[in-house]
Image (cartoon, rainbow, N blue to C red):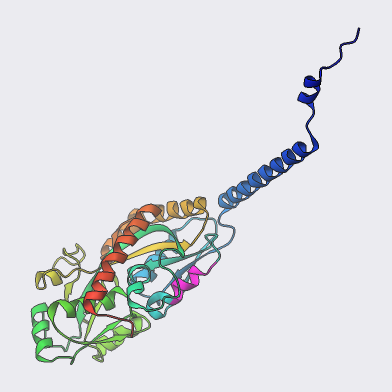
Amino acid sequence: MPIQPSPSASMSHTRPPQAASALRRGLSLMLLGLGALGAVGASAQAFPTKPVRLVVTFPTGGAPDILARLFSEKAQLGFPVVVDNRPGAGGNIGADNVAKSVGDGHTIVMGTVGTHSINGALYEKMPYDMVKDFSPISLIASAPNLLVVNNALPVKNVPELITYMKANPNKLSFGSPGIGTSVHVSGELFKSLTGTSMTHVPYKGRQFAIPDLIGGSIQVMFDNMPSALPMAKEGKIRALAQTTARRSPAAPDVPTVAESVPGFEATTWFAMFAPANVPRPVIDRLNAEVLRVFRLPDVQERLKTLGLDPILSTPEELARYQASEITKWAKVVKESGAKAE
């Protein structure tokens, strides 16, 4: 006698049409999700697929440009790294260009303390959000600014400069490569702590300010040490002091401003950022290459000669450091009364 399947057995092998349809939809969504993850993974593994554009927010010749070109020369990403100088508005023009670029890692920026920490406190309206519009990659280096003066100015040190400024209020002008740069804010901090006054003259880049400093149209500048120190050694300008708390090994004979003005400290730093929402594997690839390049012995030696201190980091360390710097410089800007003219 044939064995008939029980009702319960039949039900265990068949599903109502609605259940089967729901199962198919669930499987389809799962496959789509896996496909999307696979696409992200594949794109990250293939990165880069074309030249990487590294935006420098200032003209050629300054520390950000030097660092960018070192990376461009040494990077081994399979495609070239092309340096693109986009100066203006204290670095905001170049940084904004990157903030609004496609978030695939093929456009990155050599950010500075100005573009990613100071400018938010100086400008009433920023074209980008210093945090939300970027993906941190790595810190690169920090450096003192160097307080330099025109050779004709009758001062040889910081106390003499302060005495001269108090005897001649607003007679001197100090230049900077743009509003919001560490060069600008260093001058504002100096005025605030010494009770002196001088006029700020912003330029589109240090390469435009230096000829005026040498010629005497402006008399004072807090320029980045990598660009100012060689000129001071050549005797084209006079170095009075450096802006860090301790003397840099690159200029051990140059005192700090703090040795005459207690509490004065202004360090400039440089870091690499990508636009927001770049896939993490791409960020990790860029971070690994930044660390490899800037750990090369010849690159390390070059940085030290220029007065740059390598401070490489993880993306998370850069994010935390940037947050602390935003808080610090907002306080400095508020206390100094500086603002974007």
Location of residue 267 (image quadrant): bottom left
Does residue 109 sit above or below 176 in this rendering?
A: above
Residue at 8 percent of width and 85 percent of height: 163
Q: Is residue 34 left or right of residue 25?
A: left
Q: Please state, as top left, top right, bottom left or bottom right, where the N terminus lies in the image.
A: top right
Residue 231 located within the stretch drawn in magenta = no
Task: Report whether residue 255 is seen.
Answer: no
Q: Main secondary structure of the magenta part?
A: helix
Residue that protrudes farthest toward the front in the picture: 7
- The x and y percentages for residue 14 are 80, 28
Does residue 333 sit above or below 209 in this rendering?
A: above
Residue 94 located within the stretch drawn in magenta = yes
- The x and y percentages for residue 151 are 18, 86
Query: Which contiguous range is marked in magenta?
Result: 93-101
Work out whether residue 333 or residue 266 is closer to the camera in this orientation and state it: 333
Residue at 26 percent of width and 92 percent of height: 217
- The x and y percentages for residue 44 are 56, 51
Task: Report whether residue 91 is seen.
Answer: yes
Location of residue 60 (image quadrant): bottom left
